[in-house]
Image (tube, rainbow, N blue to C red):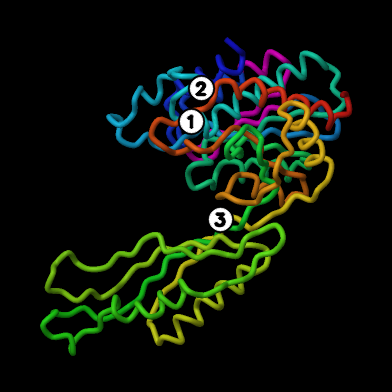
Amino acid sequence: MSETLALLKQLISCPSITPNDAGCQAIIAERLAKLNFTIEHMPFEKVSNLWARYGTASPLIVLVGHTDVVPTGPLDEWTSDPFQPDERNGYLYGRGAADMKSGLAAMIVAAEKLIQRYPDFPGSIALLITSDEEGPSLHGTKRVVETLLERNEKIDYCIVGEASSENTLCDQIRVGRRGSLGGKLIIHGKQGHVAYPHLAENPIHSAMAALSHLTNIKWDEGNDFFPPTSFQISNIHSGTGAANVIPGTLEVVFNFRFSPAITVAEIQQRFADVLMDHSLSFDLKWELSGKPFLTPHGKLIMTAEQVIKEVTGLHTRLSTGGGTSDGRFIAPTGAEVIELGPINSSIHQINECVKISDLEPITEIYQKIMERLGSVN
């Protein structure tokens, strides 16, 4: 059994449903401490964070991952226990197998092999690991990065081990992400009896035209790297539960995934203008989860492209698609950031899995990228 596969099985066996780390970081810290990594546990609130660094020189190359996983969903729909790793037909099944304990295991083994081969590595290697990526992401990577900035530890290059591949290992890498802007809209009406609508004001009826307007707006054209901004309503709730009561309020939860072609302020202003144009009485609360970022085509991307071509034979595609990742907290520091990891087709699904034959190549790719960024290969 390969080292990466063995470690992956250990990590999957820890039921680390967000924000619970369930012992994963202790396993990782023990391994890295044996190679003289400096180990720092950084707990914030109920979140476990690990910062493990080898060396003090530049460049500082950081491998970023998370130990937390999403809930399993109905256990009776799984073919095997989601926290008992199971090999079947060339795949390893278990919650977190793809998102992202496989990428995490590969990064750890790659770092170990690198230090064993180059104990005098001319730079620094660090791992930043959190248990808050699948949750609110308030007390994980975000807080660790703030701590690093306070003590002037500057990240030069960052590889996030998320499952970025689409159909074949390393067929694409993420070089940026759209921003995420969420909101909760409460539209006010007047509660009353359905038999006396003239004595009430139905916020559901009042909101329909405005919500239709918002869903049909073309917010921007995107650009060469990002698709146009999208607006999606994820939840609508109203009513008392009684069929004969006109509700007093309507609650709408929504999200924008936006490109750098538009600003947060522009989205917020245009959104509010639509509501006011429809003469609605409303309260509006916004939550910015992350701004868009794009890593320039510099040393990190070029190195990753070259290594992927050598190991897999593929000319990888550069992408900014998908959701958000913790890369959004690191890119604003000026670091070059990419997301590179296994195939993502089963993430968050029942019977989540990773292709076992992909584990050694992705481990090799991580190791070679770090070697070349440190100019030892």
Question: Tag 2's secondary structure?
Answer: helix
How many angstroms separate mark 1 from mark 3 (CA)? 23 Å
Quadrant assignment for the C terminus: top right
- Is 39 inside the magenta-drawn segment? yes
Kind of residue indicated by mark 3: Ser
The mark nearer the N terminus, 1 or 2, is 2
Contact (Cβ within 8 Å) of mark 1 with mark 2 = yes
Q: Confirm whether residue 258 shows in the render.
A: yes
Q: Is residue 262 above or below residue 126?
A: below
Identity of the residue drawn at 38% across and 82% down: 281
From the image, tell me which residue sits under label 3.
289
- Is 286 inside the magenta-drawn segment? no
Residue 302 figure quarter? top right
Disc 3 crowd rating (10 Å Cα; few below 14, some 14-19, many 20+) is: some
**Eye-nearest disc, 1 or 3:** 1
Q: Position of residue 184 (x, y in %)?
A: 42, 65
